Image (spheres, helix red, strand yellow):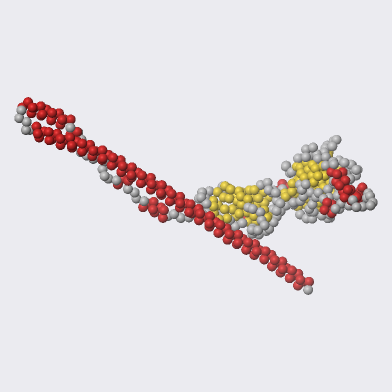
Amino acid sequence: MDSQKEALQRIITTLASKNDEIQNFIDTLNHTLKGVQANSSSILLELDEEFDGLYSILDEMKESMTNTIKQEQARKSQELQSQLSQCNNALENSEELLEFASRSLDIKEPEEFSKAARQIKDRVTMASAFRLSLKPKVSDNMTHLMVDFSQERQMLQTLKFLPVPKAPEIDPVECLVADNCVTVAWRMPEEDNKIDHFTLEYRKTNFDGLPRVKDERCWELIDYIKGTDYTLSGLKFDSKYMNFRVRACNKAVAGEYSDPITLETKALNFSLDGSSSHLNLKVDDNCVEWDPTGGKSQENKMKGKENKGRSGTPSPKRTSVGSRPSSIRGSRDRFTGESYTVLGDTAIESGQHYWEIRAQKDCKSYSVGLAYKTLGKFDQLGKTNTSWCIHVNNWLQSTFAAKHNNKAKALDVIVPERIGVFCDFDGGQLSFYNAASKQLLYSFKTKFTQPVLPGFMIWCGGLSLSTGLQVPSAVKTLQKHENGMSGSTSSLNNVMQKQDCRLIENDEKD
């Protein structure tokens, strides 16, 4: 019976997964169909605009060439009209002179005849008919303005859609996810020397497999990539996966998208748990600050709420911690007393994880490390056998120490601006690094017997937290050799057996 139920449950899980996959594909098809309709309408509008542009150019050219012909016609006509007018005037004068000469032949008086002959001779000498060119200044030929658009017509007949680059192929083997950077590499299925650049699109997702259409973030674009690979750096890995796709572009158009690829970008993400933090701490998701007035104001508010409607007066301790509404208190009591502590809201139960903290410059005292969930509300980090930390004290005298089980080991290194915390739960290792140089500051070796929580203590100052970080490659390399390094091969308790140690009083503030 049990085996049948298990088999049926596996079938149900498989069917549910397949149904989800098919539904995602249906959503993709519907989205693609809408895209086809929208893009077709857009392309048709662009086609109309392009042809309208051609028509406009042809109309402009026709008008310009028509004007040229008309101007040539007007010029030649004007020249011929002018020449024609001159010839008519010359002919009229010549006919008049001819008539005068003919009449002069009938003159009988020698003296009068001689006078008329001299006049005729002078007028002939000055006559325009003898200075006039009898060759037309322009011809009636207009062939120099004829056109032959046969070549252009052939070119127009070759109009076609632009050549579109083929879809690139992303190479999963060459893709790399490391140090909060993602390198995506691709290649073209065949050589295309007309490709001008590539575009890369990516988005974060919590779903493996093919990209989904619904309930997903928008694609982000990186344009004008000249090579066939690109590295995204400085990412916060706050999702399990990232989708990537690439397209090639020539000078005119972009081609089809490549088949998308999904790369795993898993990293530890957590926030600070303000529901159980000390009342003197002002807590946001990724930062915490010391607030000396926070406790009194919060306690006064809580006392007012508790005393309202009650006949008795509760004790101050029970009021400040035990009677808080569950929405404020969370799943555990608030830290109180001198345990100015806030924990992360996500337990670590396996694997390797990394996060970083940065202290404010005026921070007088702070600790960062790990603690079991059972850490008491009065307990300070490093003063119990359920917590491990490094502690920085800038109050009165500067100290830097690793602490566990109420014992401390002074660290002879400079406190960095950013501290990286590495937890290998399965390997029982907690290490602290200079986040910038990846120098090892200190490493605890132990065996975690229950889930642990990131822990932080603040007094007079503040811390900012960075999560969503992969374990840096340098840290992975260093921690492989860490067992051979002095001071990092055994727990702090074992180190204390070989070195002078000092007890840390439970009420000590540093």
Residue 261 in sight here? yes
Nearest the camera: 86 or 32?
86
Residue at the (27%, 39%) spot, across then down = 79
User: Residue 168: image x %, image y %?
Assistant: 57, 54
Q: Is residue 104 left or right of residue 140?
A: left
- Res 108 quadrant in image: top left
Q: Residue furthest right?
A: 312
Q: Is residue 2 left or right of residue 111?
A: right
User: Residue 152: image x %, image y %?
Assistant: 39, 51
Q: Quadrant of the C terminus?
A: top right
User: Residue 58: image x %, image y %?
Assistant: 41, 49
- Res 97 quadrant in image: top left
Residue at the (79%, 44%) spot, across then down = 288
Residue 376 in sight here? no
Q: Quadrant of the N terminus?
A: bottom right
Q: Is residue 284 left or right of residue 408?
A: left
Residue at the (57%, 53%) spot, across then down = 247
Residue at the (72%, 49%) spot, across then down = 469
Nearest the camera: 400 or 29?
29
